[in-house]
Amino acid sequence: MGEDGVEKKRKQGGFRTMPFILACDICDRFATTGFNANMITYLTRQIHMPMVQASNTITNFSGTSSLTPIIGGIMADSFAGRFWGITVGSILYLFGMITLTVSAVVPSLHPPPCAAHQQCRQASNGQLFILYISLLFTAIGSGGIRSCVVPFGADQFEFNGTQTTAKKGWNFFNLYFFANGLTSLLALTLMVYIQDNVGWGLGFGIPAVVMGLSVVVFVVGYPLYINVLPGGSPLTRLCQVVVAAFKKRSAVPPDDASLLYQDKDLDADLSLTGRLLHTDELKFFDRAAIVTEGDMLAPGKPNLWRLSTVHRVEELKSLMRLLPIWAMGIILTTSSSHNGTFAIQQARIMDRRLTKHFQFPAASISIFTVTVMLLGLIIYDRLFVPLVRRFTKHPSGINYFMRMGIGLTINMLGNVSAALVERKRKDAMNLHGDTISVFWLVPQFAIHGLSEAFYSVGHMEFCYDQAPESMRSSATALFWLSISLGNYLGTALVTIVHNSTKKRVDWLQDDLNKAKLDSYYWLVVTLQIFNLGIYVLCAKYYTMKPLEATGDVDAPKITDTQGVKEEVELGATKKNNSV
């Protein structure tokens, strides 16, 4: 690389890019939180949906918004690149927000207000179509933003698995969640107040304007970014390994793994920080790297549908190993999905008076989740990590497996609190005709915030770190996919519980004083206990991906992807054996 190239590289990347990159994601979170936090109110009070339908609409929208990142991630890794993934996603998101704002402002696009002593008119099919289209575009836009922001931000630090970059990486993931937390806090206070007291047009319009500005800011920062070129379709490579292994299903893998096919030049664009080394698990797929007659199209050019390198085989193995740990986030999301629906409805019928003339907005109860998450991140960074690091010698204090496990446990306690408080609220109302303070809901929201500080950051870092280098957009999208599936599972759980109990005492009927919402919370706690037990087993037997990194010295190195580097001479089974 020439002097000009080196100088240009020095001017790119690092924390100087964070204001531009995070601005886009912050506006996404501001917009999403701004109308998601109060969406249950909008759908029930303005669109006049029944509570269960409104709840399912929200969880379905949240699920779709978290499903599209897997598609956006694959496209970014295959051909588009992360910069264009974020840019196009932001524009689509903005279009959806503008459409939603227009539907809230134009009278013909939403039902009229309820007349006194008359049944409210529900939205027409055309009005619902406009609502769903606007939500769909914001969900599609999220696919580009959420799948690419984290890996694109991490690209600016060029992580290579050493202690120094591992510490930078950990700081970046905490910065990402901290910035999003502050944004959510602003949305939960300012935007909810505007929506409740000024109007929905302005309440949706302000986030739309902010989103438009963020697109401009992000594009302006282009000269500062390190842009990692896409490495080709990860799905194609994974399919090639599966097909090649199946074609050779009768072949016997050699005892000496060094005899399996490797090609450093072929994998160069997929392994800039080092190739993945062979592991002894999932040996069926090793057959894809067995060299047989007819595997070569020409000297040094394999038919990739018949022969894969060890690195490509290990890419598939890495993804398959992380799936059980990743899946634990599905139940976590399911167990928290009611915080934006049923808990808000609870808050509306509780005592929200702060002064004679001011009531605490029901949707703003979520600020306690965000506030505790922010405080948790600060305390974790400044107190917990330095203290624990003295004993563990780990750059992040504890590894992400422990961090996620702590988060899962804390989250379960939040739903225990929810069940107990709902029982207390019902007893006060049904036995004494009294309403208890809305701030009885604070513990459950605060506990969920503390859980976020542990689990979400650890889960995101795990997906990024344990994914193959060339698939990080796709793997980071797995974080959002777990949220998506968790929301869909939440919809299914609510529907099943509602249909199963409505013939006797409907647990989830509109009148919460007659419902059995506390029983629903205990059901969720039961699912979480089962989920935590499975997680402990999966984490105990998890195998970290082994990475061969080439440093400045001649001898290759094996890099522990959790940040602790051990330099060793590679033996016969770990050597570079290009064919």
Image (spheres, rainbow, N blue to C red):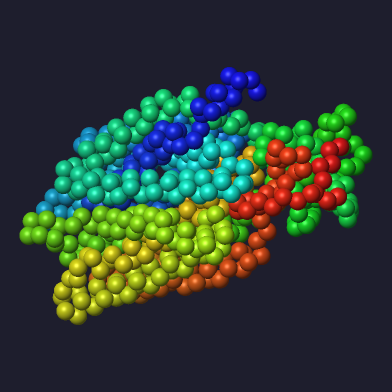
The residue furthest right is 293
Q: Quadrant of residue 198?
A: top left
Spot occupied by residue 437 in the image (x, y as percentages of width and height):
19, 68
Q: Quadrant of the N terminus?
A: top right
Spot occupied by residue 159 in the image (x, y as percentages of width and height):
58, 42
Q: Quadrant of the C terminus?
A: top right
Answer yes or no: is residue 91 visible. Answer: no
Q: On the rendered structure, is 290 left or right of 427?
A: right
Spot occupied by residue 182 in the image (x, y as percentages of width and height):
33, 47
Spot occupied by residue 571 in the image (x, y as percentages of width and height):
83, 51
Q: On the rendered structure, is 247 left or right of 187?
A: right
The residue furthest left is 356
Count the marks.
0
Nearer to me, 174 or 335: 174
Report the residue at 57% width, 38% height from top. Answer: 158
Is the residue 28 above or below the residue 481 in the image? above
Answer yes or no: is residue 457 visible. Answer: yes
Is the residue 421 above or below the residue 330 in the image? below
Report the residue at 8% width, 56% height from top. Answer: 357
Nearer to me, 379 or 200: 379
Report the residue at 61% width, 32% height from top. Answer: 230
Report the residue at 32% width, 75% height from top. Answer: 420
The residue furthest bottom is 431
Q: Quadrant of residue 18?
A: top left
